[in-house]
Each structure stands twice: as structure tokens, then as C-alpha cells.
Amino acid sequence: MEAELDDQMFHVPKGEGSNFSHYKRIVDNINFYVLMKCEYGSDMSYILRNLEEPNLEKEKPARDYESMSEEVDRLIFMEEMKYHMKRLNYYPQNKGKLYGIVWGKCTEAMRGKLQMCPNFSNYEKTDDAVLLLKDIRSICFGFPPDKNVYNILHQVKRAYSR
């Protein structure tokens, strides 16, 4: 099965309301694509699913090479370290690709909205896909990216209870 990106784009919702299913459909498509096309794509999948970076240091082999007495254990450890280092080397490249894919899935109107976000200069300079996705999600869900979602929910609850 060949992984392809479909032609759906992140767009600014018309009027009030959430665009959750549209947002999720595009993210799912990008997720499948990066899993199939990127070496160590599971790290990019983690970003798409959790909107945070994976803790790659936590997944570093934790055993102490010096305390290993068996040659087999040492060989296994060396292979695990080789895999981990290769994964660390691919991470920045994959993260840049993910940023490019996500940015490429934005309509001109969405890009205009994103350029007005306070985080824009940060993720533009660093290709930070996490910040970009968070702002896209906020726009698609109808929440201004520069506002705290919890404050908005509190204001809605307060207005509703009057």
C-alpha cells in the first residue's frame, strides 16, 4: 500500500464552531504518510498524536556497558545504542520534513492567520512542527491561538450560568 498525501488542506473555519473532524482527518493522513515515508517515522507520529516532542533520551538503552559480563549482552547493547544514535540523527531532519508537510497542507488564509500568531516567528525559524500544529488546531477549533483555552472555557461557563 503506497502512502500518499491527499489533497485536503487545513483551512480557517467559516463562522462559529469547531472543525475537529476535518483537522483530525488531515492529521491522520499526515500521520500515515510519515510512518510510511520517514525513517523512524514513529517519532513524527508521536508529535502528531500528542502535540509534544518525544523524550528520546528516556528511550536510550539504560544498561551499563561496563557491568556487562557476557559478550552477547555487550553486542546487544551496542546494537541498541547504534539504533538509538541513528534515530537521534534522523530526528531533526524528520522534524523539518514534518514542518514542511504541515505548512504545505495550509491554505493561504490559514497561513495568513498563522502569520498573525505570537508563536509564528518561533516556529518559522526553528521548523517547530509542535507549535505550528498547536496553532493550527486552535484556529480549526475556533479558539484564538494567543488565548489560554482554560480561560476561554471559564468565560463561556460564566456567561452561560448568568
Image (cartoon, rainbow, N blue to C red):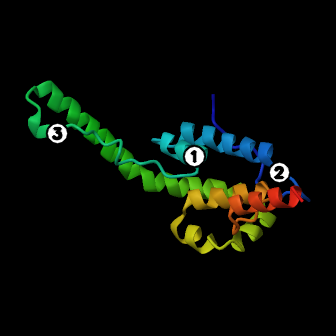
Report x, y in % for residue 47: 55, 48
The single residue placed furthest to the front in the displayed view is 162
Tell me the quarter of the image containing the N terminus: top right
Viewer-proximal residue among 121 and 7: 121
* Residue behind mark 1: 50
Which dot marks residue 86? none
The amino acid type found where label 2 is placed reads Ser
Q: What is the spatial separation of the Cα atoms under label 1 and label 3, in whole angstroms?
A: 31 Å
Q: Is residue 36 above or below residue 94?
A: above
Residue 156 in view, yes or no: yes
Please give the name of the residue rendered at 69% of the width and 58% of the height, measured from the top-left corner: 150
The amino acid type found where label 1 is placed reads Asn
Q: Is residue 48 left or right of residue 92?
A: right
Please give the name of the residue rendered at 43% of the width and 51% of the height, measured from the top-left corner: 91
Ranked by sequence position, the earlier of labels 1 and 3 is 1
Report x, y in % for residue 45: 55, 42
Question: Callout 3: 10 Å neighbours few (<14), some, many (20+)?
Answer: few
Assign a secondary structure to mark 2: loop
* Residue behind mark 3: 64
The amino acid type found where label 3 is placed reads Asp
